Amino acid sequence: MSKMNEQSEVGVQVRCQYSENMMHIQGMGISDNRPYGLSMEVRVPPSVTDWLGMQKPTRESKASAGAMLYVPVRVLVYTDGEYQLLIASTVDGGDPYNHNEGLMLNIKKDTLNNTKFLQWCDDNSIAEVIEGEPYTQESE
């Protein structure tokens, strides 16, 4: 599980409602571009932001104190160096997108933005090392 819990301010969360094809990420840890850590957007398909928009926010915004706008994210790194983000459904009864727990996204070091995010996760020991191959729907 990620290091984000009541005792710790280290972890990653994504905003449930943001824009049609951008996912807003807040990272809590070493200060980068925000006092609490990192804030950034990544391009995703509209179907991903539609799914996020149906989730029940369970985490408070670090930029808007008291506003429940986010859900937690697990950052996974596999032994082959591939990264994935796992966002568990927060809808009662579950709401799988492409993973039995919710939504799994591949994230590659193919842009400066992604590389910066993944390096920040590594620097904060947020990425969970997973043995074996990255998840695919066929591997379920």
Image (tube, rainbow, N blue to C red):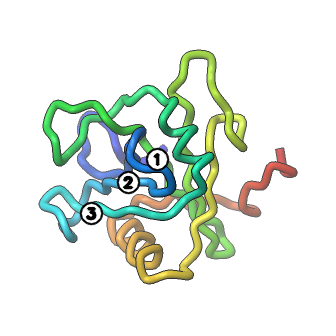
What residue sits right under mark 1 in the picture? 73
- The residue depicted at 38 percent of the width and 30 percent of the height is 57
Tell me the distance, in whole angstroms, between the alpha carbons under discs 2 and 3.
Answer: 11 Å
Of all residues, the one furthest to the top in this rendering is 92
Q: Residues within 10 Å of mark 3 (few under 14, many from 20)?
A: many
Say which of 42 and 50 sits in front: 50
Give the foreground label among 1 and 2: 2
The amino acid type, in three-letter code, at marker 2 is His
From the viewer's perspective, tell me whether residue 139 is left or right of residue 26.
right
Q: Residues within 10 Å of mark 1 (few under 14, many from 20)?
A: many
Secondary element at tag 1: strand
Of all residues, the one furthest to the front in this rendering is 20
Give the foreground label among 2 and 3: 2
Of all residues, the one furthest to the right in this rendering is 138
Residue 132 is tagged as none
Residue 38 is tagged as 3
Secondary element at tag 3: strand
- The residue depicted at 64 percent of the width and 71 percent of the height is 82
Secondary element at tag 2: strand
Q: Measured from the top left, where is residue 44 in percent x and y?
A: 55, 59
Tell me the distance, in whole angstroms, between the alpha carbons under discs 3 and 1.
Answer: 14 Å
Q: Earlier along the polypeptide chain: callout 3 or callout 1? A: 3
